Image (cartoon, rainbow, N blue to C red):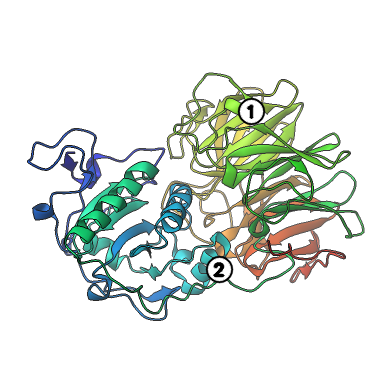
């Protein structure tokens, strides 16, 4: 394998955009991370080797600079890791490519559970709110991350390692040397093979540790009726549909707030069938089509249909695997569509629009024909207006409509976009670009959001769950004028208009809250009669 500098290999579909250049006064990184390329390396090392030759492996820097450590009761140190093969994941919790890397890391942890292999996360923030260790603790609980994570709030570890993109995954051999590194979502087979090779080296030289790392303390968080709920949808019958994301299930209520049905056993999976036996994996957005409810089964990269009459769950689109590339111009039959993290759905005039956060695109699913095609987005992560299929989005996470335009919430650019149905052109309602964010109300030119995830339309306005600011904001869909209408929330991820009320998924407080649109003050928690946490398997 040939090794090249990190800036030379950044793939749009597998790595988030890198941060702005560091100031000229920033000290040079202690090591410069290479990135694996596919070309062969002309050395005496075996051609099949995934690792750097032992003589070319630099020692890693000390783990200095973390403002906190999570899932472990003490800071990790370089010497304490000797004897272990360590997979280091440089990530940030907003980045869809980082989230799509987590299943690969979890598979490594399962496969090598009996070996001296440790995954260590280094959380280097993209947004201001991501520096908050308490907020990150909720994120780890929500995502079921149990390995140690360094809170690299000032990006000190990032700079010391010379990292340039999220995610970057590195492998440290049992002697504390950098043996493998890749920018972007790692290939599961390559990463697993690199771990196997590093373990084999450690066995051959008898340097593998005989005991696990001390002080590991996975924090799974408290149990509750809801667990980090994502999207919420007002139903035509006056009830609500709630994506109980952390419990991998969908909860349906009637107009009185009583639970009518729960779809999903509570286990993560992709099993079709009866409500109580079917499984989802981190479901998010939902939309109604007649008597059916369609669900963005985000963790499975699927679209599922809930038949409320028969109480059956049916998979209608997606392969069940993470799509390798953005959608092209080819139309797909539903089960062959290579979806990447569908995050929200919206039914409009017979079509279901799909926010593909993982490929920065909008797709259209035809529920009658069972086909999937591209509607908007080149696949490039950016804020670029113009003709729909040439425009660029950045992690679209919510959809809404006023029947004239399809509104798209771009989380990574903290912006609201609009696609005119008649002309198929994209414009920006509010927002600027990657790394431009804030908490500012007012006219469109100065208004700022911070990584919003939820959005709905009602009573002539867009209502945005401004997630990282912990607020709900009203956005004028034509002018972009923005004002705060609700505060005191903890990373709200979903919002819907139910009659004259705003209903919000107050995600990090694991609850749903409700308040009249015209009222002021805090929203009231909603109680769900008859709802209980899933039974333990």
Where residue 214 appears, x then y in whole percent?
Answer: 37, 78
Query: In the rendered image, which quarter is residue 426 located in?
Result: top right
Residue drawn at 17 percent across, 64 percent down: 27
How far is the residue under mark 2 from the one under mark 1? 33 Å
User: Looking at the picture, how far across and down is residue 208, in whole percent?
Assistant: 25, 66
Q: SS for tag 2?
A: helix
Bin the neighbour count of mark 1 within 10 Å (Cα to Cα): few under 14, some 14-19, many 20 and up.
Answer: many
Left or right, 228 with respect to 273, comes to left
Q: Is residue 322 above or below residue 151?
A: above
Q: Position of residue 271 (x, y in %)?
A: 68, 43
> Is residue 134 positioned above or below 181 on the image?
below
- Neighbours of disc 2 within 10 Å: few (<14), some (14-19), many (20+): many
Task: Compare residues 198 and 134 and report the one nearer the observer.
Answer: 198
| Residue pointed to by mark 1 | 364
Give x and y (percent) for residue 254: 89, 53
Disc tally is 2
Q: Which mark is residue 138?
A: 2
């Amino acid at each position: 394998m040939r090794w090249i500098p990190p800036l030379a290999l950044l793939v749009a579909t597998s790595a988030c955009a890198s941060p702005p250049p560091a100031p000229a006064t920033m000290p040079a990184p202690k090591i410069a991370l290479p990135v694996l390329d596919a070309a062969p390396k002309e050395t005496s090392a075996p051609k099949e080797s995934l690792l750097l030759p032992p003589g070319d492996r630099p020692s890693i820097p000390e783990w200095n600079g973390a403002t906190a450590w999570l899932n472990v009761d003490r800071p990790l140190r370089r010497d304490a890791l000797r004897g272990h093969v360590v997979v280091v994941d440089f990530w940030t919790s907003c980045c869809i490519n980082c989230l799509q890397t987590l299943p690969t890391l979890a598979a490594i942890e399962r496969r090598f559970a009996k070996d001296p292999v440790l995954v260590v996360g280094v959380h280097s923030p993209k947004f201001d709110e991501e520096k908050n260790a308490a907020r990150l603790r909720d994120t780890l609980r929500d995502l079921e991350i149990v390995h140690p994570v360094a809170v690299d709030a000032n990006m000190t570890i990032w700079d010391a390692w010379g990292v340039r993109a999220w995610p970057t995954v590195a492998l440290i051999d049992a002697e504390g040397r950098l043996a493998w590194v890749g920018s972007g979502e790692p290939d599961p087979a390559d990463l697993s093979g690199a771990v196997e090779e590093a373990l084999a080296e450690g066995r051959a030289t008898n340097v593998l540790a005989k005991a696990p790392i001390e002080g590991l303390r996975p924090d799974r968080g408290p149990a509750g009726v809801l667990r980090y709920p994502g999207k919420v949808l007002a139903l035509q019958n006056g009830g609500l549909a709630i994506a109980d994301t952390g419990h991998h299930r969908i909860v349906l209520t009637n107009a009185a707030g009583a639970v009518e049905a729960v779809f999903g056993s509570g286990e993560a999976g992709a099993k079709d069938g009866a409500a109580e036996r079917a499984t989802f994996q981190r479901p998010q957005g939902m939309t109604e089509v007649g008597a059916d409810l369609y669900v963005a089964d985000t963790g499975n990269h699927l679209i599922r249909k809930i038949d409320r009459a028969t109480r059956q769950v049916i998979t209608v689109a997606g392969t069940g695997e993470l799509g390798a590339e953005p959608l092209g111009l080819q139309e797909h039959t539903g089960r062959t569509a290579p979806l990447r993290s569908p995050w929200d759905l919206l039914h409009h005039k017979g079509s279901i629009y799909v926010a593909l956060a993982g490929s920065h695109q909008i797709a259209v699913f035809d529920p009658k024909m069972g086909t999937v095609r591209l509607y908007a987005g080149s696949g490039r992560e950016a804020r670029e207006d113009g003709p729909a299929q040439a425009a660029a989005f950045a992690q679209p996470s919510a959809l809404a409509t006023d029947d004239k335009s399809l509104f798209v919430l771009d989380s990574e650019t903290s912006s609201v976009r609009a696609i005119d149905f008649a002309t198929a052109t994209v414009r920006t309602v509010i927002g600027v670009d990657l790394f431009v964010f804030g908490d500012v109300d007012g006219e469109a030119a100065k208004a700022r959001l911070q990584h919003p995830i939820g959005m709905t339309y009602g009573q002539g306005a867009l209502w945005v769950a401004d997630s990282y600011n912990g607020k709900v904001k009203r956005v004028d869909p034509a002018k972009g004028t923005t004002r705060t209408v609700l505060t005191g929330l903890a990373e709200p991820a979903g919002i819907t208009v139910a009659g004259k009320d705003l209903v919000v998924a107050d995600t990090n407080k694991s609850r749903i809250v409700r308040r009249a649109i015209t009222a002021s003050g805090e929203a009231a928690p909603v109680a769900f009669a008859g709802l209980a946490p899933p039974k333990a398997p």
